Amino acid sequence: MREFTDEQLIAKFQSGDELAFIELVNRYKDRLINFVYGFVKNYSDAEDIVQDTFLKVYKNKHAYREIAKFSTWLYTIAGNLARSQLRKIKRRKTFTMSQLSYDDNEFDPKDMSRSHTEVLDDSYVAQEIRKAIQELSEPFKTIVILRDIQELSYEDMSKILEIPIGTVKSRVNRARLKLQSLLKHLKE
Amino acid sequence: MNCEIVQEEFSSFIDNELSVEGKNKMSAHLETCSQCETLFKNLKETLHVMHSLPSLKTSDDFVAKLLTTAHSNQNKRSSFSFLNNDIFKYSGYGIAAGLVLALGFTQLMVPKIERPNITAHNKIHSEVPLVAEMSDSLENTLNDTALNNQLSTQSSQELLLVNQK
């Protein structure tokens, strides 16, 4: 199966070959969890979203047409699910915080799920970079994750984000410069 | 090229998205501008660290879990797949059409019950005089009758007298 392209594999899966689907899952599961984790910052939420992404592919395999790259389609599904999950988390947080009294607000319970430091064994610099990425605005964060973590091409990003390549280029640059300014303290 | 334009093109330069001419202009500027050169060097270092960030891995049972859920969802869907079956669909339409026909037939067979014509009834009702008017009219009629009776008695007595004469 390894010799096939993504597009050949999805075509095989559309014809009923489940092994082709498993190969696609193995190719993208780790890349996608890193992509989604960049949004939700919680390992188990990220893994659930990646599961849901592949379940959507499994259920709607015939919705894919070979006018786009398979990876573009996949990242678009994962990105949409991650953003929708993020909105839910934000709503939940707003609700929870508004229910707490002032004293309760001062207590910051630790997340019981695995945090990225436990999962990743990051160096100090790597942790600072991840923190800085989270501080970026939503469009900048997405573009940095796609370009510098996922290493997608400008063309693929343009398709996933549905923006012209020129906008992708300028956004990548502005996002990186912003990130650089957030990491200034590392150079001091 | 001024510093602002150069800095806007940093990423395109790093990602090899610039034309040969653009690359040459950029290199020439970086050789002469220490401020842009430092910024460019720092940016490249950050990106280098970012590209080598330890990455997350999905759990070991990820694929097994995924396939179990996918298959169970598929089974759930296939249990209700008879709903999409053409035979089921068309027999459903047939049953519905039969019911409509049966209802129509029943309506035809049941004898018609005369219902009061509400419009006509209202019209009649509006033409019926009020009780007060009715009593007035009755009273007048009675008075007239009494008067007529009196007159006719008088006339008959007069006739009797004439005859006697």
Image (cartoon, coloured by chain):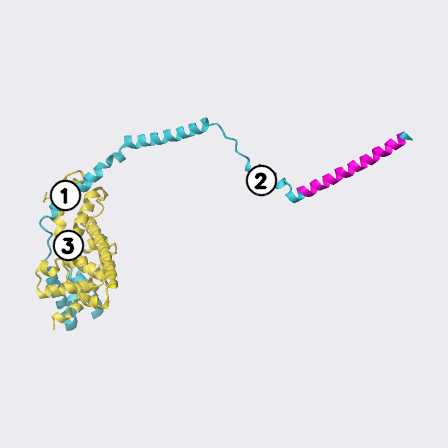
Chain colours: A yellow, B cyan
Query: Quick check: A42 left or right of B118?
Result: left
The residue carrying pointer 1 sits among few (fewer than 14), some (14 to 19) or many (20 or more) residues within 10 Å by Cα, namely few
Q: How many marks?
A: 3
The spot of residue A146 in percent (x, y) is: 18, 57
* SS for callout 2: helix
State the residue position of label 1.
B68
The spot of residue A152 in percent (x, y) is: 16, 55
Q: Please, which chain is the residue tagged with disc 3 on?
A: A
Disc 3 + disc 2, Cβ < 8 Å: no
The spot of residue B31 in percent (x, y) is: 13, 70
Specify start and end residues of the magenta stretch as a single range: B134-163
Real-space CA distance between mark 3 and mark 1, rounded to the nearest whole angstrom: 18 Å
Q: State whether discs 3 and 2 lie on one chain.
A: no
Q: Amino acid at mark 3?
A: Ser
Disc 3 + disc 1, Cβ < 8 Å: no
Real-space CA distance between mark 2 and mark 1, rounded to the nearest whole angstrom: 74 Å
State the residue position of label 2.
B122
* SS for callout 1: helix
